[in-house]
Amino acid sequence: MDVGLGINDYSNIIPAVTGATQGGGFGTAKIIAWVIFGAIGFVAFAHGKKSVLMPPMVLGALLMIYPYFVSGTWLLYIIGAALTAALYFWRE
């Protein structure tokens, strides 16, 4: 009697332990978006804080925070591009 796991049973271990559902993983495109928009947000927030300007501070904070609440890759890029464009056009 074999009580070990078979080769096909290992694919269920990580989702069972982490609670991740299929398709909800961290893809390369998502990680790149997090890094790019997070870096832009950090620079904008730091510039807004240093210059005492509210629009760059708010948009910078939004750029750093929104990826935690968005799960779709395309939506991540669309919102990030829109916030970055708002940062460019809404300057004083």
Image: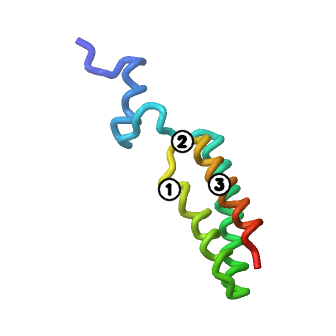
Q: Residue at x 67, y 70 (%)?
A: 42
- Sequence-wise first label, 3 or 2: 2
Residue type at mark 2 is: Gly
Mark 1 Cα-neighbour bin, 10 Å: few <14, some 14–19, many ≥20: few
Q: Position of residue 20 (x, y in %)?
A: 40, 39
Looking at the image, residue 13 sits to the left or right of residue 44; the answer is left
Helix, strand or loop for disc 3: helix
Residue farthest to the top?
Answer: 1
Q: Position of residue 91 (x, y in %)?
A: 75, 74
Q: Which residue is mark 1?
A: 68
Q: Position of residue 19 (x, y in %)?
A: 35, 41
In depth, the one of 3 and 46 nearer the eye is 46
Q: CA distance from mark 2 to mark 1?
A: 11 Å
Numbered tag placed on residue 88 in the rendering: none
Helix, strand or loop for disc 1: helix
Q: Which residue is mark 2?
A: 72
Q: Residue at x 69, y 53 (%)?
A: 81
Residue type at mark 1 is: Tyr
Numbered label tally = 3
Q: Residue at x 68, y 83 (%)?
A: 53
Q: Quadrant of residue 1?
A: top left
